[in-house]
Image: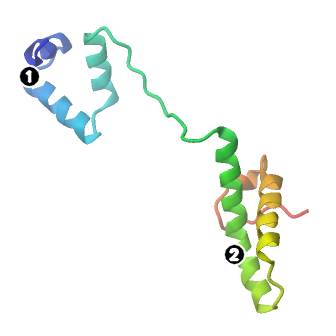
Amino acid sequence: MNAAQLARRIGVTRQTLDQFERHEANGTIRLDSLQRAAEALNCRLVYALVPNDTLEETVLAQARRRVMDRLEDIDHTMLLENQRFSASAHSEYIELSARSIIGTRFLWSEPDVNPPTN
């Protein structure tokens, strides 16, 4: 099928089909345009977000980021008081704290919001 034939099937002009192709190449094509093309080609449009990691890995990485955001302030204070964690204690604290905030509102909150205190 050439471009003119495809344009007729979709119900657009050849120039509009050229625009569709440019928008698709630029990543700016509209979903309704893709849907029209899919229907004209007897296809189903599938729009999906495919995670790069498992849900567990994504949640744990977010928990670690949240803990490390908060730990920066604590680290600075402890350094001033000469009470800084050792590297291994630092890593252990991050892991334990990260796992403890999974399932809390704090996990996905903004960095300046303090976690619940125990």
Q: Which residue is mark 1?
A: 14
Would you say 61 lies left or right of 22 here? right
Q: Nearer the viewer, mark 1 or mark 2?
A: 2
Q: Quadrant of the N terminus?
A: top left
Residue 100 percent location from the top left of the image: 83, 54
Q: Taking 40 as reference, is 97 above or below it?
A: below
Identify which amino acid the numbered label 1 is placed on: Arg
Residue extending farthest to the front is: 88
Mark 1 Cα within 10 Å, few/some/many (few <14, many 20+)? Answer: some
Quarter of the image for residue 69 reads: bottom right
Residue 18 percent location from the top left of the image: 12, 29
117, 89: nearer the viewer: 89
Residue 67 percent location from the top left of the image: 73, 63
Q: Taking 40 as reference, is 35 above or below it?
A: below
Q: Which residue is mark 2?
A: 72
Q: Is residue 108 at least partly visible in the picture?
A: no
Would you say 34 lies left or right of 2 here? right
Q: Alpha-carbon distance for marks 1 and 2?
A: 58 Å
Mark 2 Cα within 10 Å, few/some/many (few <14, many 20+)? Answer: few
First-in-chain label (1 vs 2): 1
Q: Quadrant of the C terminus?
A: bottom right
Q: Secondary structure at mark 1?
A: helix
Q: What label sits on residue 24 in the rendered view? A: none
Quarter of the image for residue 91 reads: bottom right
